[in-house]
Amino acid sequence: MSEELLDIEAGRQARKNWTQNTQEMVREILFAFSACFDIKGKQSDGQLNIDCPYCGHNTGLLQPSKGRRGSFSCNYCRKGGPVARVLSKKDNITETAAWELLNSGGRSTYPETPIFEDISI
């Protein structure tokens, strides 16, 4: 097999071998999701409905039980992937900044803007 085919097969195996997150991790992820996304509803299997940032339809699904910090899929445009990629598209930030935001529970990792009082210019 060529190296390219080996890489493709390794990616397929990695997708097959995902592990389900623990209940405690799912609770943390749900907290971060509620801070970062406008949740439209919840399905009986735990998936959350949101507007898809790619196509704009109300067919996006956040799945908190899959992946490092959950996964995303859209039933209309068929786009999907890690939630950080979707958050970076939605908020127009880098994917690294989106991972930091999700890992901090949806709270900004940037320091507060200082407020200067009694300054005359």
Image (cartoon, rainbow, N blue to C red):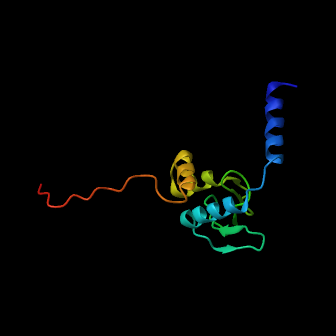
Count the marks: how many?
0
* Percent coordinates x, y for residue 67 in the rendering: 72, 52
Q: Residue at x 77, y 74 (%)?
A: 44
Q: In the shown orientation, is residue 66 left or right of residue 109?
A: right
Q: Could you say which is closer to the camera, residue 44 or residue 5?
A: 44
* Percent coordinates x, y for residue 6 in the rendering: 83, 30
Residue reaching furthest to the right? 1
Q: Could you say which is closer to the camera, residue 27 or residue 51?
A: 27
Q: Is residue 119 above or below residue 44?
A: above
Q: Give the image quarter of residue 21.
A: bottom right
Which image quarter holds the N terminus?
top right
* Percent coordinates x, y for residue 19 in the rendering: 78, 51
Q: Residue at x 61, y 55 (%)?
A: 86
Q: In the shown orientation, is residue 82 left or right of residue 99?
A: right
Q: Give the image quarter of residue 72.
A: bottom right
Q: In the shown orientation, is residue 114 left or right of residue 17?
A: left
* Percent coordinates x, y for residue 111 in the rendering: 38, 53
Q: Residue at x 61, y 70 (%)?
A: 39
Residue 31, visible in the rendered structure: yes
Residue reaching furthest to the left? 120
Residue reaching furthest to the top? 2
Residue 52, visible in the rendered structure: no
